[in-house]
Amino acid sequence: MNKRFKKIIKRLRQELEQLYCKEGSFSSPTVLQMSQQLDESIVAFQKLTKH
């Protein structure tokens, strides 16, 4: 499960980077939405791995 989450997070980071390059701004609504999705995935991963 950890490998799956890590792959998802890595993919979302790459997508966010590509989207930022396309949009040219971190304040773009689509970039903000992707960033929030990435944040939520990271928090979920941290909760699963926290002992």
Image: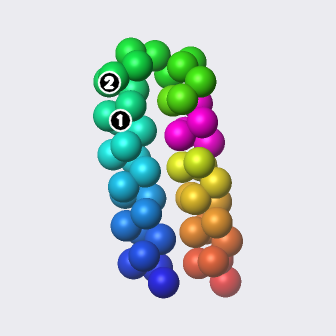
Number of the label disc, if any, that sits on residue 37: none
Of the 4 image quadrants, the one containing the C terminus is bottom right
Q: Is residue 44 above or below residue 20?
A: below
Residue at 63% across / 77% down in the picture?
48
Q: Amino acid at mark 1?
A: Glu
Give residue 38's position: percent from left, percent from top.
54, 49
Is 31 in the magenta? no
Residue at 59% across / 24% down in the picture?
29
Contact? badges 1 and 2 (CB < 8 Å): yes
Residue 41: quadrant of the picture: bottom right
Give residue 44's position: percent from left, percent from top.
64, 66
Name the residue that disc number 2 marks.
21
How is the rendered protein coloured? rainbow
**Inter-mark Cα distance, 1 to 2:** 6 Å
Q: Amino acid at mark 2?
A: Cys
Q: Considering the numbered disc 2 on the image, is that residue within a helix, a strand or a loop?
A: helix
Name the residue that disc number 1 marks.
17
Q: Which residues are magenta?
A: 32-36
